[in-house]
Image (cartoon, coloured by chain):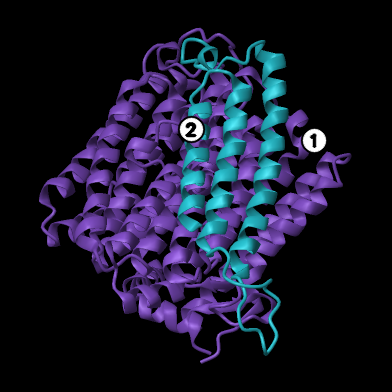
Amino acid sequence: MEILMAVLAGIIFMAATYLLLSKSLLRVIIGTALLSHGVHLMLLTMGGLKKGAAPILSEHAKSFVDPLPQALILTAIVISFGVTSFILVMAFRAYQELKSDDMDQMRGNDQHE
Amino acid sequence: MINMNNFVILPILIPLLSAILLIFKTKNLMLMRIFSTAASAIGIVISGILVQTVFTKGIQTLSLGGWKAPYGIVLAADQFASLLVLTTAIIGLLVGLYSFRSVGEKRERSFYYSGVQFLLAGVSGAFLTGDLFNMYVFFELLLIASYMLIVLGGTKIQLRESLKYIVFNIVSSALFVIGVGFLYAVTGTLNMADLSVKISESGQTGLITVIGVLLLLVFGMKGGIFPLYFWLPGSYYAPPAAISALFGALLTKVGLYAITRVFTLIFIHDTAFTHQLMIWLAALTVIFGVIGSLAYSNVMKIVIYNIITAVGVILFGVAVHTPASIQGAIYYLIHDMLIKGALFMLAGTLIALTGTASLHKMGGLIKRYPVLGWMFFISAISLAGIPPLSGFVGKFKIAEGGFAEGEFTISMLILLSSLLVLYSVLRIFIHAFWGEEKETPKPNHRTAKGLLYPAAIFLLLSLLFGLGTEWVSPYVDQAAETLLNPEKYIEAVLKE
């Protein structure tokens, strides 16, 4: 199961990388969102899958899954949610100002402001 | 010895609370400025006391929520972290002072001070935390504040460059979480002291070294190390000088701090590979930084490329990993934070006065602005490491450590790079201040006074830091000692 999930995370990473390399700004943003999904899936897998019951500890608990990766994912999800919404707003604003969503046209150098 | 101390959280809490309060006070500009300055001043006092407490009583720790160390999140202030927190607070105050006259009222009203305080909270938190995932959270805090600051004002160049900056940092943060996840899967802990113990017990296998290199990659992206610095010149060029000064002085240094922490505490058993890799990267970083700073004739770009050179020098000191070189790296890190702040402010003042950033369009400014000229000169020779000023001790110790370890070529390279660094900054001095006065696009005859105070304080601190090395050295020695003997850190964090 873990191997399957690791492969799946790999595929998501692959798709995210492909999207990140594209010209369209919206695709890049979807790429970043997909990338963080892959990361979260990987984190979940790192804690080990299908190992036992919910992580509510009592003195008699015999098997339970590791709660820490889930707590980490929760934090990471909140952060990536915030960042994604921020970058979406910024991309919209950039589109309004620069009249383009093509990363190729956003290169810019010293001479050209 | 119990060293629990609630004091440790204050350098994070004060900027965080004042940032939140500042959100509600956008009506009254004067009140915002005073409040922000007062918060920063309190921050300096608090971190000063922290430095002194750590100096007399050893490493201070705080288990958040009362959960003991390997299970809960712990804050740990050793001397290295405390010194950097103090420097951060000083930079926060001075950048705040510089902002009054330079960033413009519109930006100031748009939560500028709030953003700065959030950034300071994130940076201090990243320095103080003793937990790797918590470090990620503080990194995100400072990054989100930096996203906001870099785009604040919404000019075209800012929007363009900050999009790249954000996408780049999202990718590096994703890799950070992956690295943390891998490390947790292998060792079952995220507390840095506990990680160090676990890895010492089980031995640093190839897998752990790979994770170490992954983290080096992540922190190298934030710090601007050789193949990964390409985002830096563009992004730091976009925002106003005050924000560039803040970023240039603080953000890359957080990456360097993280590298130092991780590679002196956790991944210390395969130095032949990891630290040798860092030495080569440091050398390449210095070379490319110097090339960049010589290639441009834009004042801001020259200063920005000098950040990259400095990152290389500090990384070399850390990577050589001897007492002398680590001490040198700490001296140079603090020196660079101060002097980069000053240089960015002076370059920003220069641009504000002439209305151009191009060296070819400036000239003869020494007649009109002698104080600015001489301050620029002092900061240039301080940057290069001319003896009475602060850069000297750091570079001397780093080179001493390098030669002692037999890294002759790269130590020589570091020393030679100083000359080129000096040339690159003196070029600004020669072209902008000497020669004939030229008609600048925006002939602006206002005085530079308000903009020069903060830079003058930076230079004064740099001077004191250089001349007062004798008083500073016990603190730096203690910081280096803790970095070289991870047992001390581990004992302080894990033992009751």
Asked if residue B424 shows in the view, the reply is yes
Label 1 SS? helix
Asked if residue B152 shows in the view, the reply is no
Label 2 SS? helix
Label 1 sits on what residue type? Arg
Instruction: Identify the subunit bearing mark 2.
Output: A
Which of discs 1 and 2 lies nearer the camera? The answer is 2
Quadrant of the rendered image containing residue B226: top left
The answer to whether tags 1 and 2 share a subunit is no
Residue A40, x across and y down, in percent: 58, 51
Report the residue that reaches farthest toward the bottom: B1
Check residue B18 in the rendering and tell me which mark sits there, or answer none: none
Q: Quick check: marks 1 and 2 in contact, CB under 8 Å?
A: no
Instruction: Identify the subunit bearing mark 1.
Output: B
Q: Residue at x 33, y 27 (%)?
A: B292
Residue B36, x across and y down, in percent: 73, 50
Quadrant of the rendered image containing residue B133: bottom right
Residue named by callout 1: B109
Q: Residue at x 74, y 46 (%)?
A: B114
* Residue B65, placed above or below residue B340: below
Counting every numbered tag in the picture gives 2
* Residue B163, placed above or below residue B134: above
Instruction: Say which of A25 and B206 sits in front.
Output: B206
Q: Which chain did the renderer colour cyan?
A: A
Q: Which chain did the renderer colour purple?
A: B
Residue B18, x across and y down, in percent: 76, 55
Instruction: Say which of B307 and B383 sits in front.
Output: B307
Label 2 sits on what residue type? Thr
* Residue B400, placed above or below residue A8: below
Residue named by callout 2: A17
Q: Is residue B150 left or right of residue B203?
A: right
